[in-house]
Each structure stands twice: as structure tokens, then as C-alpha cells.
């Protein structure tokens, strides 16, 4: 998993509430178990009509948001089914950080497992960030995970909370497999001991 320490990038705004995982990545894109290529289907029903023609007004079709790495969203983002394809699609598009007033629990946990930082902020702070994000080329934020601060284009800073264990995993680029491999020596020692004392196991 790619490490996350500090990110400076374009912030796109999608101030809709209850954006579910089917809206993030529609069911027709779930045929693959690969994590790549899903960015094309991200928000597909919002981005394209039934003939595949772009909705030009949608934020991710406008410059500079086509290169956005930060998404400012509405409350209860990622609700609905537990599909892990949702954070895969966001990551494949280029998003490394999602900021919202609240997240669905499973989606929130899946973000951390895939190298995306989900940040919960009060609605009044979200409104300020959306206002910044609407400024086009000036819609740049810096997310400093180590300092737990968001810096806006005007120099203002917003602190945020994050679980210490999840923070460490993102900074060190540790997914569930990486965390298990940290215990490799203990696992090997246990297997050696078990093989000696309980050879029938």
C-alpha cells in the first residue's frame, strides 16, 4: 500500500448527502477483482448519460478537477453495500483523501485499508472547504497526516482527528498483509515450536 504522509492537491467538491457505494461505482463495474481500471466507472451515472455521453457540468469533467486528489463530500458518504470496489475506484481515479461530515462505517474502514485517508469534520468546516474548492485553480489543499492538519489556499489551518493505529498504517504504508508480515518472526517461531511439540497438527 502506498504511504500517506503529506498530500497537496486539487480538491473537488461533491456536496451531496447519502452518496452510496452504488453511486460511487455502479454494479456493472463489479465483474473484476482487479483494483485498476475502475476509475473510469467512478460516479458513472453522474458523469455520463445512458449513451455514455459526458455530463459536462459534472465537477470531475471540469478543469482543474479532472486531476483532483481530494474530495469534499456530504454527510453519510459511502453508505449502502459494503463493496470494496468503491474505495478502489476512488483511488484509481486519483483520490487519496475524502473529507466529509460523516461516513458509513464499512466504507470508512475500507478507505484506510486501501491507502485513502477519510477525514471527518463538522459541517461548518466542510462548508468552508467547499467554498475554497469552488475557486478552480486556487482549490488546492494540503493534508498533513503527521501534524493532523488541513491547510487551505488562504493559509488557514483545520485540525482533524485520526485513530493512532490507522495513522501509523497510512504513514508506513501497511495494509492487513503488511501488518501480518510484521509478525513474521513470531509466526515462524510458533510454527517451528508447534511442529516439534505437536507434530500431528
Image (cartoon, helix red, strand yellow):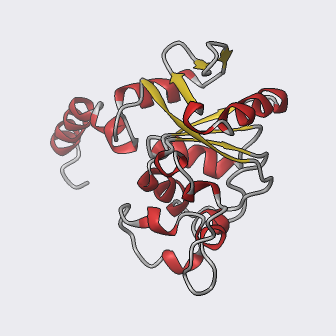
Q: Position of residue 168 (x, y in %)?
A: 45, 24
Quick check: 116 left or right of 4?
Answer: right
Image quadrant for the C terminus?
bottom left
Q: Position of residue 145 (x, y in %)?
A: 51, 21
Front residue (pair 29, 44): 44
Q: Residue at x 76, y 48 (%)?
A: 15
Residue extending furthest right?
124
Please tell me how many numbered marks the rendered image carries: 0
Looking at the rendering, in which quadrant would you find the N terminus?
A: top left
Q: Residue furthest bottom?
A: 51
In percent of width and height, residue 126 lies at 76, 33
Apparent side of residue 95 relative to residue 183 in the rendered image (left or right): right
Residue at left 78%, top 53%? 16
On screen, residue 22 above or below 180: below
Q: Quadrant of residue 31?
A: bottom left
Residue lying at 66% horizontally and 35% vertically, measured from the top left: 135
Q: Quadrant of residue 108?
A: top right
Where is 32 relative to 145, above or below? below
Q: Is residue 60 left or right of residue 178?
A: right
Q: Is residue 80 left or right of residue 189?
A: right
**32 relative to 35, above or below:** below
Foreground: 126 or 139?
A: 139
For residue 174, what is the image quadrant? top left
Percent across and percent down for residue 88 are 46, 57
Residue at left offset 79%, top offset 56%: 18
- Between residue 119 and residue 131, name the one nearer to us: 131
Amino acid at each position: 500500500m502506498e504511504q500517506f504522509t503529506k498530500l497537496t492537491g486539487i480538491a473537488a467538491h461533491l456536496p451531496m448527502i447519502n452518496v452510496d457505494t452504488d453511486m460511487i461505482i455502479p454494479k456493472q463495474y463489479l465483474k473484476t477483482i482487479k483494483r485498476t481500471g475502475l476509475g473510469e466507472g467512478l460516479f458513472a451515472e453522474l458523469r455520463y448519460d445512458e449513451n455514455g455521453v459526458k455530463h459536462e457540468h459534472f465537477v470531475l469533467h471540469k478543469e482543474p478537477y479532472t486531476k483532483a486528489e481530494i474530495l469534499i463530500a456530504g454527510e453519510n458518504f459511502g453508505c449502502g453495500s459494503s463493496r470494496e470496489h468503491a474505495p478502489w475506484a476512488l483511488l484509481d481515479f486519483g483520490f487519496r483523501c475524502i473529507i466529509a461530515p460523516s461516513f458509513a462505517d464499512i466504507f470508512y474502514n475500507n478507505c484506510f485499508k486501501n491507502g485513502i485517508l477519510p477525514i471527518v469534520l463538522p459541517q461548518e468546516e466542510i462548508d468552508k472547504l467547499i467554498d475554497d474548492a469552488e475557486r478552480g485553480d486556487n482549490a488546492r489543499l494540503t493534508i498533513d497526516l503527521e501534524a493532523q492538519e488541513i491547510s487551505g489556499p488562504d493559509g488557514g489551518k483545520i485540525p482533524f482527528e485520526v485513530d493512532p493505529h490507522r495513522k501509523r498504517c497510512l504513514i508506513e504504508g501497511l495494509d492487513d498483509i503488511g501488518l501480518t508480515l510484521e509478525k513474521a518472526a513470531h509466526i515462524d517461531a510458533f510454527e517451528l515450536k508447534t511442529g516439534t511439540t505437536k507434530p500431528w497438527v
